[in-house]
Image: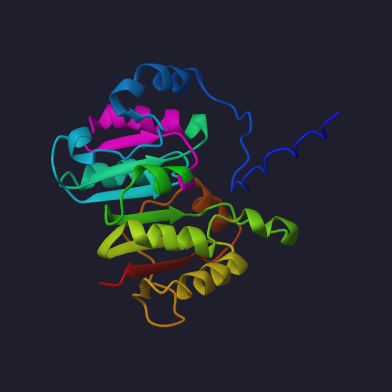
Amino acid sequence: MEPKPPPASRPIRSFVLRGGRITAAQQRACAELWPRFGLSYESTTLNTEAIFGRRAPLAMEIGFGNGEHLAARAAAEPDHDFLGVEVHAPGVGHLLLAAAQLELRNLRVIRHDAVDVVRDQLLPGTLSEIQILFPDPWPKKRHHKRRLIQLPFVELLASRLIPGGLLHLATDWEPYAEHMLEVLQRCAGLRNTAGAGAYATQSPARVATRFERRGSRLGHTVRELTFCRRS
């Protein structure tokens, strides 16, 4: 009998899908509003001009949580288009409800792993800005390999930015902030807008996420990083 081939290796994910509580309204939003705001993951490039019906700067938020910040930005910046990527259904449903209430025409959502989306669906030089706000810090040392901010992914993100495009990160977990800063400074395609080894000043226009509000209640300090793609 021939030996069985070894099982295919599974990629390390930066998230764990949990059966979180989803409301009836969020479920309805995922079913009824998805054709209006949702985009399916496919291993083919997105035609963003066809999707939004125009050519405009395109910003992306990865792991938007409940989508408060993303919805507010899309409403405040109608001359920009926005793409949100999230894996958790309750947050997607929450954002879809907000998008419908605000009648946003410049927002689309993909429910899939952001690594696949960035690699397969976006061409180099597509995005004017990428935001990753309060990603899971995976604080235990044995879980550090799950952290989203790793050099190969940062280099991929940098390639998808236009020259001068911005990569904006935020965390309230100090060891993760130090890790982020070290990784981003190793990416040759990016430049720290705050200066070498420095964190950025917190943006007053940013809407606080629920993760940030929880960290504030616990007395955590928010660290922000803003790096731009070199020309």
Evaluate whether residue 105 shows in this view. Answer: no
Side (left or right) of 203 relative to 2:
left
Give the total of numbered labels: 0
Quadrant in the picture for residue 168: bottom left
Which residues are the magenta region? 92-115
Task: List the single residue furthest toward the front.
Answer: 1
User: Residue 213 appears at what percent x and percent y?
Assistant: 50, 52
Placement of the N terminus among the 4 image quadrants: top right
Asked if residue 174 is among those painted magenta in the image, a careful observer would answer no
**Furthest-bottom residue in view?**
196
Residue 18, percent from left and from top: 63, 33
Q: Which residue appears at 28% of the width and 24% of the height?
A: 36
- The colour scheme used here is rainbow
Taking the image as shown, residue 196 lies to the left or right of residue 150, namely: left
Residue, far right: 1
Residue 106, magenta (yes or no): yes
Q: Is residue 100 above or below residue 141?
A: above
167 left or right of 6? left
Seen from the viewer's position, the closer of residues 145 and 197 is 145
Is residue 150 at all visible to an observer of this figure? yes
Quadrant holding the C terminus: bottom left
Please name the residue shown 37% across and 71% down the image. Answer: 190
Q: Is residue 192 left or right of residue 149?
A: left
Residue at the spot 37% in from the left edge and 46% down from the top edge: 69
Q: What x and y, as percent, mark residue 186?
A: 48, 75
Work out whether residue 52 or residue 140 is closer to the camera in this orientation and state it: 52
Q: Which residue is at the front of the view, 169 or 56?
A: 56
Foreground of the two, 8 or 26: 8
Q: Position of residue 141 (x, y in %)?
A: 73, 62
Quarter-of-image position of residue 226: bottom left
Does residue 197 lie above or below 216 as drawn? Answer: below
